[in-house]
Image (spheres, rainbow, N blue to C red):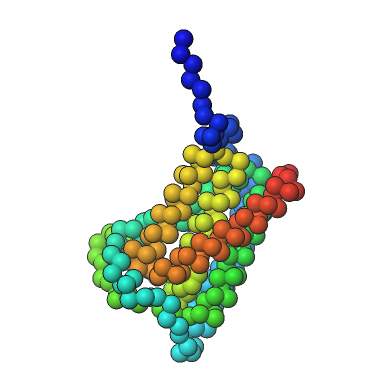
């Protein structure tokens, strides 16, 4: 009988597979609704306020290169761009406990506030020419373009939030599940470029911001445990 022996040099993810989603309890749903309401208000004030303030003056920075203007324009990628919202709304189904949901809410709140500082200090506009898109794809693209506002570029809040989701949602799961979340986050990051909503530096800084805040939250969860 032939015996197959795995090399000790091969990394093996021995964590048992667990379901990605789990039906939340009523208290968890209530907590989620409260957090969504609070974070939505925070986003409206910070994101909208920063853009409004930038519109009151003419100070602008240039944080992009001419090479970026060759990035192709793919308006249909607006569907992926907008998929950030359902990704965020999955949090009560993925995180399962009140402690994790609260920790995740803090990450998103800090991401919004920190991004707002960046928008105020480094306001600028996308350097890509305006594009006309018709039909259903055009409607989706123009909706995505409208919520992006004009001067809120660095960091990309979209990328920061998607990165935070991928990092936090992967807690306790095996490599395959974590790869799934990161693939979604990377797709959202790419969509911000090919829909010409952001430049490369915005995406890089947004990714670093989301990852750093999420890693801190993960340490807090692992230290204090779940309740």
From this view, report whether residue 89 is shown above or below residue 212: above
Give the tally of numbered discs: 0
The answer to which quarter of the image holds residue 137 is bottom left
Which residue is farthest right?
Answer: 224
Judge by depth and name the residue closer to the eye, 136 or 173: 173
Image coordinates of residue 63 in percent, x first then y, are 43, 77
| Left or right: 219, with 120 as reference point | right
Image coordinates of residue 135 in percent, x first then y, are 25, 62
Q: Residue at x 46, y 69 (%)?
A: 202
Image coordinates of residue 218 in percent, x first then y, are 65, 51
From this view, report whether residue 118 is shown above or below residue 38: below
Judge by depth and name the residue closer to the eye, 133 or 117: 117
Q: Residue 143: in sight, yes or no?
A: no
From this view, report whether residue 40 is shown above or below residue 125: above
Judge by depth and name the residue closer to the eye, 175 or 191: 175
Q: Residue 11: in sight, yes or no?
A: yes
Q: Residue at x 36, y 56 (%)?
A: 79
The answer to which quarter of the image holds residue 74 is bottom left
Image coordinates of residue 180 in percent, x first then y, are 46, 44
From this view, report whether residue 162 is shown above or below residue 154: above
Which residue is farthest top?
Answer: 1
| Left or right: 71, with 64 as reference point | left
Q: Quadrant of the C terminus?
A: top right
Q: Residue at x 33, y 63 (%)?
A: 194
């Amino acid at each position: 009988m032939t015996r197959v022996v795995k090399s000790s040099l091969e990394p093996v993810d021995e964590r048992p597979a667990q379901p990605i989603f789990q039906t939340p309890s009523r208290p968890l749903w209530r907590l989620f609704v409260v957090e969504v309401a609070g974070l939505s208000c925070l986003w409206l004030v910070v994101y909208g306020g920063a853009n409004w303030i930038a519109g009151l003056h003419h100070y602008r920075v240039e944080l992009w290169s001419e090479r970026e203007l060759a990035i192709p324009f793919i308006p249909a990628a607006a569907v992926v761009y907008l998929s950030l919202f359902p990704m965020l709304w999955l949090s009560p189904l993925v995180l399962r406990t009140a402690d994790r949901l609260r920790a995740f809410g803090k990450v998103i709140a800090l991401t919004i506030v920190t991004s707002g500082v960046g928008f105020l200090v480094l306001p600028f506009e996308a350097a890509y020419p305006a594009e006309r898109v018709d039909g259903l794809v055009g409607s989706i693209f123009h909706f995505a373009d409208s919520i992006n506002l004009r001067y809120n570029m660095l960091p990309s809040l979209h990328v920061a939030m998607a990165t935070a989701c991928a990092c936090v949602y992967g807690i306790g799961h095996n490599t395959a599940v974590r790869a799934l979340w990161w693939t979604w986050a990377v797709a959202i990051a790419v969509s911000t470029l090919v829909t010409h909503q952001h430049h490369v530096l915005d995406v890089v800084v947004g990714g670093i911001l989301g990852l750093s805040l999420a890693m801190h939250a993960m340490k807090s969860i692992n230290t204090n445990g779940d309740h």
